[in-house]
Image: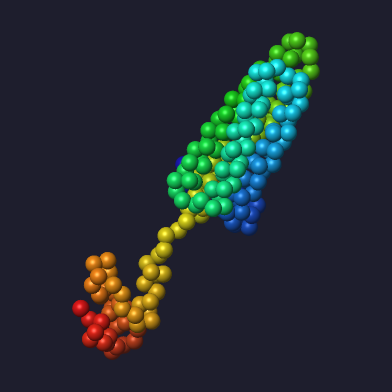
Amino acid sequence: MSASMSHYTTTLADALCGGSSRKLIAGWWYSVLALTAILILMTVPVMSTRTAGETFASVWSAVLSFILCIGGTMIMRKFHNSMAVGFFMGGVVAMAQLFFMLFLVYIGYAKDQVAAEESAKEERFMSFLCLIQSVLLGSFAAILGAHRAEILDKPLSEKSVMSGVSEGMSTFNYSGDYSETSTAADESLEPGYRAPESTRV
């Protein structure tokens, strides 16, 4: 499943972002931010014309979306450790489920408005926005899960840690003794080369 998702998202990145998975993740997140701004703006007419229950659903979802957007943007820009990214992915999945439930809730409110012979345009529009937001958040979580390695900070490689060996520098291991790696590396520089006696164990 993960392999097929990675293949699909890689194909999507090739088609939309020139093969860059990081650009695909950033673009998808910007789409989520844009739709969140629309949902927050839609709370104003809902608060002024609808019932207390519908107002609470709209305002509470807007507050949670705002918190997710601020926290998610901070994590994507600054905090690239596995714990922060995992927490972010969990929050995105939870919000995707919340907006799917709100999609069903607004459909119910729309039916109530129709039964009362009143306009249900706002409820239908909000249900449509909630469905789109749920799809965007769910797909974003899948893309982030498939390419989370490109977001996480990479540890220093052995090559960078041992970069001084190629310059003839002797290295120490964690016990404080000279490492045999430097001698082996020095001997591989040119045939017949022997390291000075001071660097031998």
User: Residue 1 location, x and y as percent?
Assistant: 46, 42
Residue in the foreground of this view, choosing between 160 and 142:
160
Q: Residue at x 45, y 58 (%)?
A: 154
Q: How is the image coloured?
A: rainbow
User: Residue 162 location, x and y as percent?
Assistant: 36, 72
Residue 94 vs 179, above or below: the answer is: above
User: Residue 166 location, x and y as percent?
Assistant: 38, 79
| Residue furthest to the left | 201
Looking at the image, can residue 2 be seen?
no
Residue in the foreground of this view, choosing between 27 and 81:
81
| Residue furthest to the top | 116
User: Residue 61 location, x and y as percent?
Assistant: 62, 30
Residue 157 vs 81, above or below: the answer is: below
Residue 93 vs 21, above or below: the answer is: above
| Left or right: 129, with 198 as reference point | right
**Quarter assignment of residue 125:** top right
* Quadrant in the picture for the C terminus: bottom left
Q: Residue at x 55, y 30 (%)?
A: 97
Q: Residue at x 70, y 38 (%)?
A: 37
Residue 159 vs 141, above or below: the answer is: below
| Left or right: 76, with 153 as reference point | right
Looking at the image, can residue 197 be seen?
yes
Q: Residue at x 66, y 28 (%)?
A: 59
Q: How many marks?
A: 0
